[in-house]
Amino acid sequence: MSIGFGWDAFYLAETLLTQPILVIVGDKPGGFGAYRDGYEIVRRAASVKKELVVLKNTSHYELYDQPKPVGLALEKVIPFFKENL
């Protein structure tokens, strides 16, 4: 007999996700919903300070290792961390 455990990033976000949150997505929807999920977690988060950044002409996969999209993301991430960590 095996017992499986699942994890849902959205579970109790309206209550527990109170820290500042920055979500970066590309505007090219991909195959597994990262684009849609980015909007949803920002909408549901209880955080007072929350920001969604949508990078034009960028896919989820390009945010892993493509210099231009990663650079654009870091332009937002670095100041956000400096202010909120």
Image: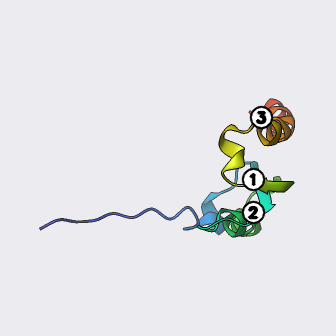
Quadrant of the rendered structure where residue 83 is? top right
Q: Which of these two is toward me, 54 or 23? A: 54
The residue drawn where x is 65% and y is 62% is 34
Element under label 3?
helix
> Mark 1 is on which residue type?
Val
Please indicate whether residue 9 sits to the left or right of residue 63 in the image.
Answer: left
Q: Is residue 39 visible?
A: yes
Q: Are marks 1 and 3 in contact (CB under 8 Å)?
A: no
Q: In the image, which is nearer the foreground, mark 2 or mark 3?
A: 3
Number of other residues with Cα within 10 Å of mark 3, as a class: few under 14, some 14 to 19, many 20 or more: few
Dot 1 or dot 3, earlier in sequence: 1
Q: Are marks 2 and 1 in contact (CB under 8 Å)?
A: yes
Number of other residues with Cα within 10 Å of mark 1, as a class: few under 14, some 14 to 19, many 20 or more: some
Quadrant holding the N terminus: bottom left
Per the model, the C-alpha gap separating discs 1 and 3 is 18 Å
Quadrant of the rendered structure where residue 59 is? bottom right
The residue indicated by pointer 2 is: 42
Q: Which of these two is toward me, 59 or 7? A: 59
Q: Are marks 2 and 3 in contact (CB under 8 Å)?
A: no
The residue indicated by pointer 3 is: 67
The residue drawn where x is 62% and y is 64% is 13
> Mark 3 is on which residue type?
Pro
Per the model, the C-alpha gap separating discs 2 and 1 is 7 Å
Dot 2 or dot 1, earlier in sequence: 1
Q: Is residue 53 visible?
A: no
